[in-house]
Image: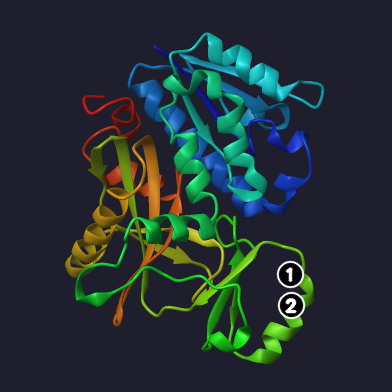
Amino acid sequence: MQILIFEWLTGGGRWIDGVSLQCGSAIRSQGMRMLQAIAHDFLIGGIEVILPIDERAVDDFPSIDGLTLYPVNQQVDLRQSLEDLAKNVDRILLIAPETGGRLLGCVQWLQPFHDKLVSPSEELVRIASSKQASFEYLQNQGFDGVSRGTEFVEFWNGPMDNFDFPMVVKPNDGVGGEGLHLIHEYAELERLESQLTGLGYWIEPFYQGVPVSISVICHGGDFTFLPATEQVFDGEPFGEFVGSRFPVQEDFECRARRLAEKTVRLLPPTQGYIGLDMVIGPEGDQLIEINPRLTMSYLKLRKVCSFNLAMRMLGPDG
């Protein structure tokens, strides 16, 4: 069996336009680490891996049996190349930032091969790539929170007097901690406003608590819920992602799992790996966002789980 794995930032996407330049070096490094890890896990599972790779990053992949690199430079028609490669493989895994519609665009490029995808469907990517769309979808599905009366995070784009401080301002299609601001007073917000004009930003309350991620491998209505991990940043409360801490305390694990189960059962049926970011707090548990792709939690989870996560993406018996 052969699988085509395409990661936007390391696979040649940066040759196309400037959209991905909104993602800094930290995000590009994360993309490379995820790509190396999941390619390795498919290889040890006996799957041949086809990897489009930016020619500037070829040296990051040593020669390994079963791994075929397809160097990409600025002369390559990336979309056509992916379509050509997709014709001859059994499965396809797509990883890209939601920023600027990159992930959604990749899924749409390979729509004729959607039955080969082991990453989330176009419908889920469209919903989860926008924080507004995610909220509206779950609200329409009757999402009323979890036990103890907690509710889904509400996003506003209305008058500023609807808010209490502190508040969080972030891109509607942001990824990681890029473009995220914690605002404590109106003066800070006024200074920030000129920078945000014309951009798709959302404002939400700042929730005190522990940032936790739950990853789920989906196969239609069948789900493999992976252990909860705590997200660790180099700043407080935000900053660049440093890594995932495991285990989390038992009560947090149970609360995160309940919130994850309630959420995924309302989402459209899909396949592949998704990540749910949430805050487990003293005043309730809040879903922050849905990541319709591989996340950095994978790097920790692949070490603590007793099975090969990549192979599980191929099916329950993978």
Where does label 2 land, which residue? 193
Circle on res. 63:
none
Describe the element under mark 2 as helix, strand or loop. Answer: helix
Where does label 1 land, which residue? 196
Looking at this view, name the residue that lies furthest to the top: 88
x 39%, y 45%: residue: 274
| Amino acid type, mark 2 | Glu
Residue 155 in percent (x, y) is at 51, 70
Marks 2 and 1, how far apart in space? 5 Å
x 77%, y 69%: residue: 197
Q: Do the residues labelled 2 and 1 touch (CB within 8 Å)?
A: yes
Residue 300 in percent (x, y) is at 36, 49
Q: For residue 314, what is the image quadrant?
A: top left
Quadrant in which the N terminus appears: top left
Q: For residue 54, what is the image quadrant?
A: top right
Dot 2, how many residues are within 10 Å of its Cα: few (below 14), some (14-19), or many (20+)? few
x 77%, y 71%: residue: 195
Q: Is residue 138 visible?
A: yes
